[in-house]
Amino acid sequence: MSSALTGGSLSPEVCGEIVQWTRMSDLPFLARTCKSFQFASEKKLYDILILGNPTVAFEACRTIATAERLGPYVRELYVYQEERRFRSVTLNLQFWQVVQAAMNQMCHLEKLYIHDPSGQNTFILDPDRLNFQLDDVQLRMNWDDHVVAFLKDQRSLDRLTIMRGPDNFEHPLGSDVLPHLKQFVGAITVATQLLVCPLTHLQVYVDESSSVPLLSFIPRLVKTGATLRSLSIIHLPDPIALDALHLISASCPKLCYVGVLPFASRHRERFHRSLISMHHLRVVELDVTKWEPQPPPLLHNILTTELRVFCPSVEFIAFWVGMSRFCWSLQQDNWIYQPETGQSTRSEPIWKTV
């Protein structure tokens, strides 16, 4: 092969441009042709590591742990077990030790997703072994001292997901943590500790076994009144939905988004009254799954018009019926139905975009 084709006479910029148009499956071969292509190819190969196959994850992390040049290329790391495609295996201590050793080399890591089925291998988050400041962290692991120490060390974090919260306020975070945190998804027991942060977007999961009931949590949101724009509540029980909305309107009247709220036809008047004080509300998501009979989607137009009488600032309403969503958008004082498309269902959730 000539030097021109192997990159011997090509600048690093040209090699990088060629790599950008090369299929991922061809990059390992291209990396072996010359030093210039090796650098550009490896940088693209290791930029985003999505490791759902435990065998591949182990080998990739072992390679990074032993080849120091590779770790700085990694900006995003996802470690989990994709059980639908690969046989489920027990991720042993050696597996997680190799993951930790690889993470130790990733000085430019920006986003981290870790799902440990056992939840117990939080030692990999030891801040003394890590050398990065993240923008986005998603952890499906048990809440313990390792997680707390890790979060206290992350001073640049913008987005955080913690699905397993503490029990009985064990392992508190303290007040001087995550000074730049804007978005949180997860357990109410964790969210309670983050209300001192400048949160703009918050999604909490209602768990009946939580040590912090939802109706006790909502009034505490007054602490975020100056910054919070969006509040999403998952699994909001029907019996407390109206009480929850009343508390939300009193504690967070400046919200621009609220959802997903169970919307009972027989309680519409009380529901609407709670919205009167929410003058900044632009987007609402409602769950009408339990309506009997179920109104056809085009009749949702009547409900949108009725709701806007009490809350004139609303310009987008989504109705959920089971797993189907029906969206209505206000355009020139007319409500227009917007059918969901494949592209729209894969886009960011509405609550994150407001």
Image (tube, helix red, strand yellow):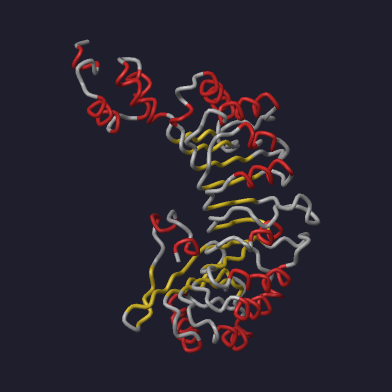
**Residue at point 58% right, 57% down?**
184
Residue 144 location in percent, x, y? 74, 44
Image quadrant holding the C terminus, namely bottom left
Is 230 on the left or on the right of 262, as rendered?
left
**Residue at point 70% right, 55% down?**
174
Residue 334 location in percent, x, y? 35, 82
Is 163 on the left or on the right of 166, as rendered?
left
Image quadrant holding the N terminus, namely top left
Q: Quadrant of residue 321?
A: bottom right
- Given the current orientation, which residue lies at the most extreme top position? 1
Q: How many marks?
A: 0
- Given the current orientation, which residue lies at the most extreme front position? 176
The image shows residue 206, relative to residue 135, as above or below, that is below
Residue 109 location in percent, x, y? 49, 37
Q: Which one is in front, 85 or 40? A: 40
The image shows residue 138, relative to residue 271, as above or below, that is above
Is 72 on the left or on the right of 178, as rendered?
left
Q: Which one is in front, 226 or 137? A: 226
Residue 313 location in percent, x, y? 44, 81
The image shows residue 15, relative to residue 115, as above or below, that is above
Q: Which one is in front, 172 or 31? A: 172
Q: Which one is in front, 292 or 131? A: 131
**Residue at point 54% right, 72% down?**
226
